[in-house]
Image (cartoon, rainbow, N blue to C red):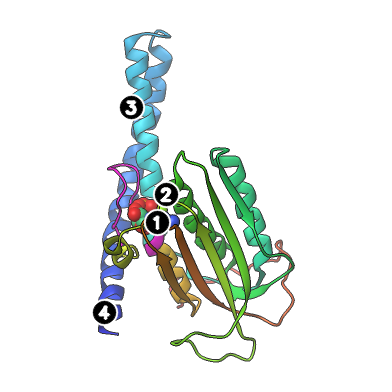
């Protein structure tokens, strides 16, 4: 429990610090990208200069992606819990994955039918997406399978009984798995085993925070050479899922 308090404090401090820096940084990057675009118009096509300007542009966009990840980590809007059909989320994510992953990486959802949980749809999307992205990156250019599924479940230790019960969401891959050291550290902000510039190490810290906010629980099963399975326990809802286009009230920030 003490561990968790320390982790939460660390998350908050890191969040505030990085949020401020990331915002300014984003403005600087916008200037760089704008200027490199203008410069590219003046450079002769196919010249060394044009190539160098293109490299500036690629690097600046990469930096912008990382900054965006930082911002989404630091300045998270509080979620707006509502009944959400998990199958709509997993369908959408697996569809997006098929479009963005190499064809050697298959993805499927091995559950069907509606499964309503109580959560913020944007946050749920982010949870499933971050986990699947990591699975895809772990598989890399090899052949592999990412499998998403969900089912009703009895609450594990540490979670209360709820009248509406719990749902277990799983994201499994048959990639290389991870070392024990990685497994114990993977939810830490800025922990990454990926090369510099590839990963900010925030994906799972974000997921952890979002699951916690929903009152859920996330655990991981993984060993080197044996793939990885993330288990996410989410509060179920007996209400019908409301349609996606439902009007969201704008709540003022900081009302958590
Ligand atoms: P990032 O993806 O930027 O490195 P994350 O917080 O998303 O940061 O993940 C942290 C680390 O956890 C990764 O660098 C990787 O070592 C490990 N990891 C996460 N998911 C998997 C997975 N499915 N298979 C193997 N390793 C994983
Ligand atoms: Mg990641």
Is disc 3 surrounded by few (<14), some (14 to 19) or many (20+) residues within 10 Å? Answer: some
CA distance for labels 3 and 2: 28 Å
Task: Give the secondary structure at mark 1.
Answer: loop
Identify the mark nearer the N-term, 1 or 2. 2
**Which residue bears the numbered disc 3?**
56
Q: Which residue is mark 2?
A: 138
Q: Nearer the viewer, mark 3 or mark 4?
A: 4
Ranked by sequence position, the earlier of labels 3 and 4 is 4
> Marks 3 and 1: which is nearer the front?
1
The residue identified by callout 1 is: 177
The mark closer to the camera, 4 or 1, is 1
Q: Residue at x 35, y 21 (%)?
A: 53
Bounds of the magenta segment: 189-205
Q: Position of residue 156 (x, y in %)?
A: 49, 85
The answer to whether the residue labelled 2 contacts the one labelled 4, judged by CB atoms less than 8 Å apart, is no
Q: Tell whether label 1 touches label 4 (CB within 8 Å).
A: no
């Amino acid at each position: 429990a003490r561990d968790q308090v320390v982790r939460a404090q660390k998350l908050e401090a890191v969040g505030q610090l990085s949020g401020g820096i990331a915002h300014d940084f984003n403005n600087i990057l916008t200037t760089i990208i704008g200027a490199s675009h203008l410069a590219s118009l003046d450079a002769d096509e196919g010249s060394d200069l044009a190539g160098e300007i293109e490299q500036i542009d690629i690097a600046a966009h990469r930096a912008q992606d990382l900054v965006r990840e930082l911002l989404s980590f630091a300045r998270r809007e509080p979620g707006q819990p509502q009944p959400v059909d998990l199958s709509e989320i997993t369908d959408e994510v697996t569809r997006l994955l098929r479009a963005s992953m190499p064809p050697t990486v298959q993805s499927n959802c091995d559950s069907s039918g509606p499964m309503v949980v109580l959560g913020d749809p944007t946050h749920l999307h982010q949870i499933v997406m971050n986990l699947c992205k990591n699975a895809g990156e772990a598989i890399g250019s090899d052949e592999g399978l990412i499998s998403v599924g969900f089912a009703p479940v009895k609450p594990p230790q540490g979670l209360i009984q709820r009248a509406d019960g719990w749902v277990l969401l799983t994201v499994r891959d048959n990639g290389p798995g991870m070392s024990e050291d990685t497994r114990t550290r993977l939810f830490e902000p800025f922990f990454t085993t990926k090369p510099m510039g590839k990963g900010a190490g925030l994906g799972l810290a974000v997921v952890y925070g979002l699951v916690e906010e929903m009152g859920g629980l996330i655990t991981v099963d993984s060993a080197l050479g044996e793939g990885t399975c993330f288990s996410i326990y989410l509060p179920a809802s007996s209400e019908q899922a409301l349609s996606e286009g439902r009007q969201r009230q704008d709540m003022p920030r900081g009302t958590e």
